[in-house]
Amino acid sequence: MIRISSVLWLLVWLGLVFYLGLTLWLGMSGLVYAYQLDYGEGIVLWFAQQIYHGQPIYKSLTDFPFASSNYPPVAMLLSAALMPIFGEGYASGRLLNFVSMLIVAVLIYRIVQAETKNRNASVLAALFFLGSPYIYHWSPLDRVDLIGLAFTFGGVYFVWEYLRPPTTDRRPLLFLAFGVLCFLFALYTKQTLMAGPAAAFLALWMRNRRQAILFAVVLGAIGGALFLVINFLTAGGFYLGLIESNVSLFLVDQLVAQLITFATTFPILLLLALWSWIQRVRAKPIGVLEWYAVAAIAMLSLAGRIGAWENYFFEAIAILCTFLGYQFATWSVLRVLSLRNTQYATRITPLILPVLLLIQLALMNHDPWIAADLMARNYSSNQQLSPLLQRTQGTIISEDMGALATNGKSVDYYTYQYSMLARSAKWNQNWELNGLREGLFPLVILEHGTRENVDHYRRFTREFVSTLDRYYARTQTAGKYEIYTPAPPLKLQSANFGNVIALVGWNLEPATLQPVICNLTIVWQAKRGMDRRYKAFVLVERWDGDKVTQDDREPRYGNYPTTRWAANEMVRETYTLNISEDLSPGKYVLKVGWYDPETDDRLEVPGSQDNAFVLATYEVK
């Protein structure tokens, strides 16, 4: 039994070291990677660059350029401070992110080691944090979340030190002061990091209510004063950026999906940490770590906000790994006792924990090839896009704002921020919609799939992509990027198909019917939402009804079916008409229409006998 237990534990440690190696590899790869890896990186880099050049990052939401930071400034200030050393790319922010991750692991190690005197338990807890897939995914990014976690976990650590039984060489009041300072830095890194201060207040309240009140007053007074000062210096821009423009819709189904993913990724960690938490609460008065676990789990409710992802689970992962370390230390004692017992039922106890941890490691399941492939594809895409950006003048709207920041272009429009403001009726979109109508933006750059999944990504509104399809055409693809430029004017023509779809206008290239491949561009508009997937058909017929060529298909080749169109949305489609060389002289008609592929019934076209609308007639001589 001892040999089996040792083998199992060897596998656990090997698994943890393997995951640690992957996290360190990915984090260090990010330090030398020149391009954006995550949507949120580009805007963080842009604001750090603005700080570095002495430009404001908090401004009125109605003044051009339309980009105001919706994060507090600490992480971006630190990144800007390192730019003289590491340049104006992602390196400084990613280095801070990477170091912050290691700092949290060291604090977990320190807390577990101090309370259990078990070095193996301390190392295991720290390695589970570093090896968790959520931390692995975030390790190479220039984002504020891990930096904020390092500050808030540092605050919890100092309050924990303050509340521990005093020794002759300790300075408890200094620890409490450091805790307040860390919490301030945390809240001014990411404003949702409230679990740590809440846990500290509750732990202090249970020990000394006067101290708890003093803690809250000092933290609130300093934090509030800083807010008022910054808000005054930015003429209200700080409030607008952090509060007004940070408005976000809450989706219950997103929250449920996030929680299910978290629970199914870390079931063993959750169960063992919960068991450890219950044991500690029964054994002694609840302390700051126990309160922090409760607060961190409660804050997971914010994962329902649009835009939330794994970063909203970092606090929970850190404290759960801490309690896992306690459980490991307790199990180590049981293991020694059980090995001395001759009863088989008791001696099997040492096998339980390593088996559970191996199951947990299997569920964490890292695949480094996914990250390597993503980085390679991103690199290739940016290499193709960069020359185009560098030679283009004027305001460019790009979903990948990091591509603008790394090519010396201004981020004039923070896509996600203003889309969310528009959805909450705090922004009327006139600037970007009128700009699209007038062709003022030389380039609009979307990532592949965004147009077809606009409600999933929410980086643009339906109104934006509808107007984009009306006045712009996708003219180029650069890797993952789809590049739109102002389109030639349409031949405006109205037609109604079953009172569900309307024709806005069209173009044929070449403009005359001839023996070549002709491209027919049509802009459609949904008259209302649809619950059926319709197919469009375009065809060329001889005057006597003989068909020459035809193209039938769903929008975007089935990737954007009519069931996903919103009422009044416009969608641009290009159809291919292959005109053979043996086209004989005579009259021809170009027709379009829609039908239900399940029944083959065409949508009704008023005044048409075959429910097809005639776009044009041609005379071939």
Image (tube, rainbow, N blue to C red):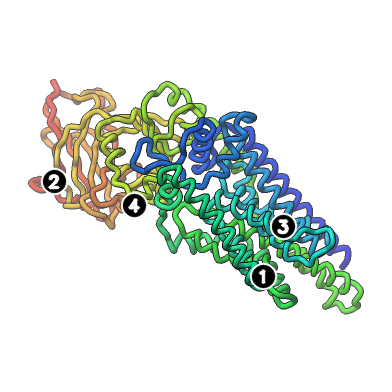
Split into 4 quadrants, where in the image is the C terminus?
Answer: top left
Amino acid tagged 2: Asp
Q: Earlier in the sequence, mark 2 or mark 1?
A: 1
Q: Which residue is mark 2?
A: 610
Q: Which residue is mark 3?
A: 175
Residue 371 percent location from the top left of the image: 60, 42
Give the alpha-carbon distance from disc 2 to disc 1, as whole Å.
69 Å
In front here: 186 or 170? Answer: 170
Amino acid tagged 3: Phe
Residue 332 percent location from the top left of the image: 83, 67
Q: Residues within 10 Å of mark 3 (few under 14, many from 20)?
A: some
Q: Secondary structure at mark 4?
A: helix
Amino acid tagged 4: Arg
In front here: 474 or 171? Answer: 171
Q: Vertically, is 292 above or below 487?
A: below
Q: Earlier in the sequence, mark 2 or mark 3?
A: 3
Q: Earlier in the sequence, mark 3 or mark 4?
A: 3
Q: Which residue is mark 1?
A: 274
Mark 3 vs mark 4: give the one in front.
Answer: 3
Give the alpha-carbon distance from disc 3 to disc 4, as whole Å.
45 Å
Mark 2 vs mark 3: give the one in front.
Answer: 3
Q: Residues within 10 Å of mark 2 (few under 14, many from 20)?
A: few
Q: Vertically, is 298 above or below 461?
A: below
